[in-house]
Image (spheres, grey):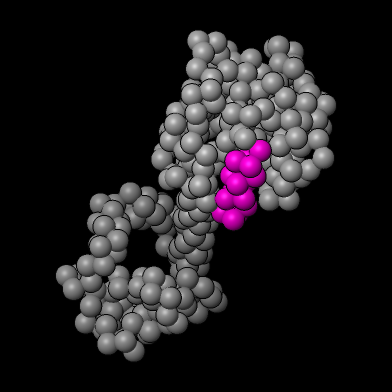
């Protein structure tokens, strides 16, 4: 469980909180710059100190170690590469936990494993500080424009205390839940959607290009699919497992997917997504779902059964 902040821990004050920012990659340096523009007193740390030069020129202090950076900070924001780096910067010698004051808040914006996020929350609790999981969604240009989206998970009162600083770099702040792992799981889902979408776009273009379909028509079809009302309707349908209201049957879907695979084969293209769909639709037929809406193929994964 997350520690409940007491009256002393909340440090209610009219003064702006002191902020430490650790990790000045492309995303981090843009986020830190927005925090600085918002007027928060800023200390920064990065393994390569020269990346802090522009921030220092505008008044930030550059610390030699994570421990030194967070020593007097009320709010700490970290933007680090992966689980191993986060572990080293947080828990290693001269790390964040070694210098973090009791009652201070650490918002971790990195994409890390849900298990590590929970462990960080526990480690901060044991040390007397607070951890908020706050992974961000968006590209570098969104970070530069303070238009990132972040998913925050942790104690609600602690999140509210950190919110003004987070709002300096994120225009969208989404509730992630009470436990750190929930925010990081949600971030991985967002990235899964993105990666799957990229793969689907690529396979669509490959099939279309090899089949002689006009590029502008392919572009219109892709824009139409990802922005179509029917796509949103399917999200609701699958979420509710509403498979008895049939728009297109499993049998029909399997037939069409096999035609897709054959069309790809004709132009020397292996459609890996179509192969996966074929296996799941075939699994749905074996379960006697052939008369249900073809979107029931999604339950092959949700029920943890083999297709």
The magenta-colored residue range is 111-127
Q: Is residue 140 visible?
A: no
User: Above or below — where is 144 with respect to 186?
Assistant: above
Q: What residue is shown at x 81% (from left), y 35% (from top)?
A: 94
* Image location of residue 300, percent across then percent down: 39, 76
Q: What residue is shown at x 61% (from left), y 34% (from top)?
A: 129
Q: Quadrant of the C terminus?
A: bottom left
Q: For this view, does 267 lie left or right of residue 59?
A: left
Number of numbered discs: 0
Give the main secondary structure of the magenta stretch. helix
**Is residue 118 rendered magenta in the image?**
yes
Residue 65 occupies which quadrant of the picture? top right
Q: Is residue 93 visible?
A: yes
User: Above or below — where is 259 with respect to 240?
Assistant: below
* Image location of residue 283, percent across then percent down: 38, 84
Q: For this view, does 7 lie left or right of residue 253?
A: right
Q: What residue is shown at x 42% (from left), y 72% (from top)?
A: 301
Q: Nearer the viewer, residue 223 or 89?
A: 89
User: Above or below — where is 246 with respect to 221?
Assistant: below
Q: Nearer the viewer, residue 164 or 231?
A: 164
Q: Nearer the viewer, residue 62 or 199?
A: 62
* Image location of residue 31, percent across then percent down: 60, 28
**Is residue 46 rendered magenta in the image?**
no
* Image location of residue 83, percent across then percent down: 68, 51
Q: What residue is shown at x 49% (from left), y 59% (from top)?
A: 196
Name of the residue lying farthest toward the left: 245
């Amino acid at each position: 469980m997350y520690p409940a902040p007491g009256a002393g821990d909340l440090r209610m004050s009219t003064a702006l909180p002191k902020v430490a920012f650790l990790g000045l990659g492309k995303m981090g340096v843009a986020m830190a710059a927005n925090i600085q523009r918002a007027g928060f007193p800023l200390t920064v740390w990065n393994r390569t100190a020269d990346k802090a030069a522009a921030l220092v020129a505008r008044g930030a202090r550059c610390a030699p170690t994570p421990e030194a950076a967070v020593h007097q900070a009320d709010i700490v924001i970290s933007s680090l590469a992966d689980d191993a780096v986060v572990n080293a910067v947080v828990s290693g010698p001269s790390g964040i936990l070694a210098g973090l004051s009791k009652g201070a808040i650490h918002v971790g914006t990195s994409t890390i494993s849900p298990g590590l996020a929970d462990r960080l929350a526990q480690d901060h609790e044991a040390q007397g500080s607070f951890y908020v999981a706050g992974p961000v969604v968006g590209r570098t240009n969104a970070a530069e424009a303070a238009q990132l989206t972040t998913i925050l998970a942790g104690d609600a009162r602690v999140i509210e205390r950190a919110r003004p600083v987070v709002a300096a770099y994120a225009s969208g702040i989404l509730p992630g839940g009470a436990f750190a792992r929930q925010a990081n799981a949600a971030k991985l889902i967002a990235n899964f959607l993105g990666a799957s979408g990229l793969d689907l776009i690529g396979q669509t273009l490959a099939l279309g290009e090899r089949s002689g379909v006009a590029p502008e028509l392919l572009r219109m079809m892709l824009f139409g699919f990802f922005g179509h009302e029917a796509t949103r309707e399917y999200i609701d349908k699958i979420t509710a497992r509403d498979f008895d209201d049939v728009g297109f049957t499993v049998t029909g879907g399997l037939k069409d997917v096999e035609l897709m695979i054959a069309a790809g084969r004709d132009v020397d293209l292996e459609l890996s997504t179509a192969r996966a769909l074929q296996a799941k639709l075939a699994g749905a037929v074996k379960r006697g779902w052939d008369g249900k809406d073809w979107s029931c193929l999604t339950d092959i994964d949700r029920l943890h059964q083999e297709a």
